[in-house]
Image (tube, grey):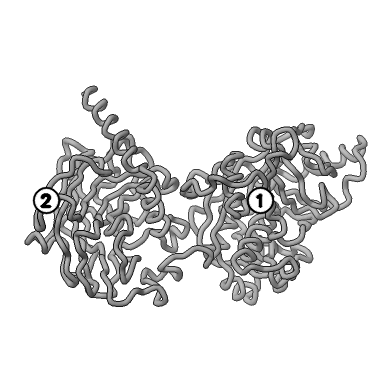
């Protein structure tokens, strides 16, 4: 599991059965509720959300309707009873069951079957006891999602929710064996804002959220809209995990979200509650997540073996592979100045022609928020400029440190550098000085996916720190300049030229220690999208102005 720590977490954990509890709002009932809440011992808001990958926002929710209701794609309302398992209900029973149902086009009748629902008990048991609260009260979104990603989750038919039992015990092997068939590919943090949650719901994607629970919410039994709350009990406000199934811009005074709870159908409006947009963003929702099912989004390497899946191989075609990459600090006096040596091969069957107008790019992106990215070097293969076998600098392009054009064809079985009588390319570049945080640098052959290839999964070659983790960069200075792929005198690739069917030496940063990292499919889609929208050019213009200002200050 990744990034696990001893956490005292937030998602609440209301550990008693709510069904039928609030029959009135008299003082005795309220005091009993508050006493019970205060006795639980809330888990602190200490989830490591800064290192949960944010979803890459491609603005795919534009033009969404004024109302969406996905509740028919959810399983029936559940009841967590007297246990602190709301995370298991939110991301296991509700989110995972729903995306599985969407992927398989399940009917409402099928979603009501235990064999099509996922077990909060199995998920909660599978979380390491070190990442649960005292007396098994609660866990984190991160710990639960990591389990669904690495182990999977068993169905409710196999692991019924009929009492939590000894939650410190490991699940039976029969549960774990079934769980392996039901995993998620990844999970992503999204902005806990009205616009963001609304956008994902508009794409037909359910959202799991963490919320702060107040007095009105606890006692809700209305079809109306929750617009505010009070927190009469003392101590830390309770935190809880639920899901969002829809929205309606015309519900209540400001529009509202339809929230799915796990306290049984007797609570709220048949187990649901409408939450006002303004209250949702200002006080109610503190975190939000989406997830991709194991096979719900296309990935040419869906089984994670770093080889393209057999069923997506394109025979008798080109195949670019990123084979060499060294990135090193050649001038200690100027620590943001670095040098890259690289080469790309065509190990396919046919020539890749300049008129296909493809590119090699060297980019950076924030390891936990790939919405922060940029192109540092841009090597463009095209017939747009001058005659064949000529090349030269580009006046404009997306690379912040360099842009070059080349009017050359690359025959099958040869490298790009071969066309210039060279063993590889050397290129000086500057790391943007505004970079501070955790980043990956990656060389991408066919950066915008212009060439139809035999294998798309070998186009990437990553520069990481020496432990395959992200590089830490501070004001443009790489903290680990001798990380993997950085030493010009060493290579991690085999001591030979690549052959058809080879994988890139460093094709991905997704691994057992870093299972939720961005996939190459996500990065490729991001670059394609931003090229089409003109965002690439806007970013280079912004960078150029920043660099001018920096040099003026020197």
Q: Is there any visible trace of residue 458 in the rendered image?
A: yes
> In front here: 353 or 10?
353
Question: What mark, if any, has residue 133 been given in the picture?
Answer: 1
Question: Element at badge 1?
Answer: loop
Q: Is residue 329 left or right of residue 221?
A: left
Position in image of residue 402 (x %, y %) = 20, 43
Mark in the foreground, 2 or 1? 2
Position in image of residue 536 (x %, y %) = 33, 43
Above/below status of 96 relative to 476? below
Above/below status of 501 relative to 12? below
Label 2 environment density (alpha carbons within 10 Å; few <14, some 14–19, many ≥20): few
> In front here: 178 or 449?
449
Q: Is residue 503 left or right of residue 512?
A: left
Q: Is residue 55 left or right of residue 27?
A: left
Distance between mark 2 and mark 1 Cα atoms: 67 Å
Above/below status of 536 relative to 358? above
Label 1 environment density (alpha carbons within 10 Å; few <14, some 14–19, many ≥20): many
Question: Element at badge 2?
Answer: loop
* Residue located farthest toward the top when viewing the structure as drawn: 553
Give whichever of discs 2 and 1 has the lower sequence position.
1
> In front here: 514 or 24?
24
**What residue is pinned by disc 2?**
386
Image quadrant assignment for residue 198:
top right
Position in image of residue 57 (x %, y %) = 48, 47
Image quadrant assignment for residue 217:
top right
Q: Is there any visible trace of residue 134 in the rendered image?
A: no
């Amino acid at each position: 599991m990744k990034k696990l720590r001893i956490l005292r977490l937030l998602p609440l954990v209301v550990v008693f059965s709510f069904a039928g509890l609030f029959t009135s709002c008299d003082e005795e009932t309220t005091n009993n509720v508050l006493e019970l809440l205060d006795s639980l011992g809330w888990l602190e808001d200490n989830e490591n959300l800064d290192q949960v990958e944010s979803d890459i926002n491609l603005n795919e929710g534009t033009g969404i309707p004024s109302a969406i209701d996905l509740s028919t794609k959810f399983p029936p309302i559940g009841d967590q009873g007297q246990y602190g398992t709301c995370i298991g209900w939110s991301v296991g029973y509700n989110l995972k069951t729903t995306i599985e149902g969407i992927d398989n086009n399940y009917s409402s009748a099928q979603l009501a079957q235990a064999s099509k629902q996922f077990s909060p008990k199995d998920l909660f048991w599978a979380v390491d006891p070190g990442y649960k609260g005292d007396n098994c009260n609660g866990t984190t979104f991160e710990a639960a999602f990591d389990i669904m990603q690495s182990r999977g989750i068993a169905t409710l038919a196999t692991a019924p929710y009929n009492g939590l039992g000894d939650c410190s015990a490991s699940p039976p092997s029969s549960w774990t064996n079934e769980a392996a068939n039901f995993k998620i590919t990844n999970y992503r943090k999204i902005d806990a804002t009205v616009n963001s949650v609304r956008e994902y719901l508009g794409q037909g994607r359910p959202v799991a959220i963490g919320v702060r629970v107040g007095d009105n919410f606890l006692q809700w039994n209305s079809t109306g809209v929750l617009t505010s709350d009070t927190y009469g009990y003392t101590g830390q406000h309770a935190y809880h995990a639920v899901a969002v199934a829809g929205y309606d811009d015309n519900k209540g005074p400001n529009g509202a979200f339809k929230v799915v709870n796990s306290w049984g159908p007797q609570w709220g409006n048949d187990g649901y509650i409408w939450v006002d947009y303004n209250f949702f963003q200002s006080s109610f929702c503190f975190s939000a997540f989406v997830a991709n099912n194991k096979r719900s989004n296309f990935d040419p390497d869906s089984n994670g073996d770093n080889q393209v899946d057999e069923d997506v191989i394109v025979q008798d075609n080109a195949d670019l592979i990123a084979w060499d990459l060294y990135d090193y600090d050649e001038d200690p006096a100027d620590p943001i100045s670095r040098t890259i040596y690289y080469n790309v091969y065509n190990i396919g069957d046919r020539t890749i022609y300049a008129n296909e107008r493809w590119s090699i790019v060297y980019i950076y992106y924030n390891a936990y928020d790939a919405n922060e990215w940029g192109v540092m070097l841009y090597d463009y293969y095209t017939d747009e400029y001058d005659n064949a076998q000529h090349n030269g600098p580009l006046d404009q392009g997306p690379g912040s440190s360099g842009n070059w054009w080349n009017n050359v064809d690359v025959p099958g079985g040869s490298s790009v550098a071969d066309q210039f009588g060279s063993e590889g390319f050397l290129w000086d570049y500057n790391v943007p000085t505004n970079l501070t945080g955790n980043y990956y640098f990656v060389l991408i052959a066919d950066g915008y996916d212009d060439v139809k290839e035999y294998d798309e999964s070998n186009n990437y070659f990553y520069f990481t720190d020496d432990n395959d983790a992200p590089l830490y960069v501070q004001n443009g200075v790489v903290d680990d300049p001798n990380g993997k792929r950085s030493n010009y005198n060493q290579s991690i690739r085999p001591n030979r030229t690549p052959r058809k069917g080879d994988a890139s030496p460093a094709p991905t940063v997704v691994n057992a220690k870093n299972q939720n990292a961005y996939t190459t499919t996500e990065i490729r889609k991001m670059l394609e999208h931003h090229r089409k929208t003109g965002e690439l050019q806007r970013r280079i213009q912004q960078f150029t102005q920043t660099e001018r200002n920096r040099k003026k200050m020197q």
